[in-house]
């Protein structure tokens, strides 16, 4: 089954404690990205990757890091989480051409206290 | 100004009603357009692509007006199961095929 898998689904952490949210896709997609969703603001892109070892900033990259060492994996790293990073996070992948469907993971609900 | 703007709603309609949502985009270089559906903070899923000539999928019709830079979604004969948030999505190749989302329009269909 074609899917994007994120882990964990829910996480409560404390300010400053490094965390990683994993994302894996089994569709051999080149394009992967991370979004955060906040009430009234919609989904905003954090980082994206057009292929292995190629990553770039999205609209709200501050406080986040990513890596793309393998095509299937695209982890999101919060080196020092802060309360303003409390949000719902989605990983997405697509084939990379502009007219194709994006597939989303089930989301990670992160709370930073 | 946001790149993609939608009326947030909520639109409260009775079963069987016809409802229409509009979405405007600011980047004239945008090349691909979609409607995604999101249920109760779950992941967005593709509802339909939007083509220049307009397209229909069952009870759903999507239209694109490039001159005025807006996209519309029409839902006929609304069902309770249509209750969701509808996200307008625009892609421009000049931004590395980035999906730009509207904030979403909430639809509530009531019996």
Image (spheres, coloured by chain):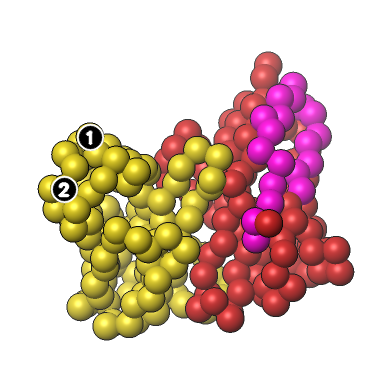
| Residue B50: % across, % down | 70, 62
Q: Is residue B52 magenta?
A: no
Mark 1 Cα shell of 10 Å, populated few (<14), some (14-19), many (≥20): some
Q: Is residue B16 above or below residue B72?
A: above
Residue for point 29% across, 58% down: A63
Is circle 1 on the same chain as circle 2?
Answer: yes
The N terminus of chain B sits in image quarter: bottom right
Where disc 1 sits, the SS reads loop
On residue A16, which mark appears? 2
Q: Is residue B4 magenta?
A: yes
On residue A113, which mark appears? 1
Q: Chain B, which colour?
A: red
Range covered by the magenta-colored residues? B2-22
| Residue A14: % across, % down | 16, 39
Q: Quadrant of residue B14?
A: top right
Residue for point 26% across, 65% down: A65
Chain in yellow?
Answer: A
């Amino acid at each position: 089954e074609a899917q994007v898998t994120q882990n964990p689904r829910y996480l409560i952490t404390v300010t400053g404690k490094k965390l990683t949210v994993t994302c894996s896709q089994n569709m051999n997609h080149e394009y992967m990205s991370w979004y955060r969703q906040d009430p009234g603001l919609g989904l905003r892109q954090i980082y994206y990757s057009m292929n292995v070892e190629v990553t770039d900033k999205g609209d709200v990259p501050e406080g986040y890091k990513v890596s793309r060492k393998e095509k299937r994996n695209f982890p999101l790293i919060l080196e020092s989480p802060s309360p303003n990073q409390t949000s719902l996070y989605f990983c997405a992948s697509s084939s990379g051409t502009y007219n194709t469907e994006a597939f989303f993971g089930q989301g990670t609900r992160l709370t930073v206290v | 100004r946001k790149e993609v703007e939608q009326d947030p709603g909520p639109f409260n309609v009775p079963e069987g009603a016809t409802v229409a949502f509009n979405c405007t985009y600011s980047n004239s270089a945008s090349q691909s357009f979609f409607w995604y559906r999101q249920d109760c903070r779950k992941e967005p899923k593709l509802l339909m692509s939007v083509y220049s000539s307009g397209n229909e999928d069952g009870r759903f019709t999507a239209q694109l007006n490039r001159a005025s830079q807006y996209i519309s979604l029409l839902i006929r004969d609304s069902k309770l199961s249509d209750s969701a948030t509808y996200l307008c999505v625009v892609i421009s190749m000049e931004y590395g095929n980035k999906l730009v989302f509207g904030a979403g329009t909430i639809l509530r269909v009531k019996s």
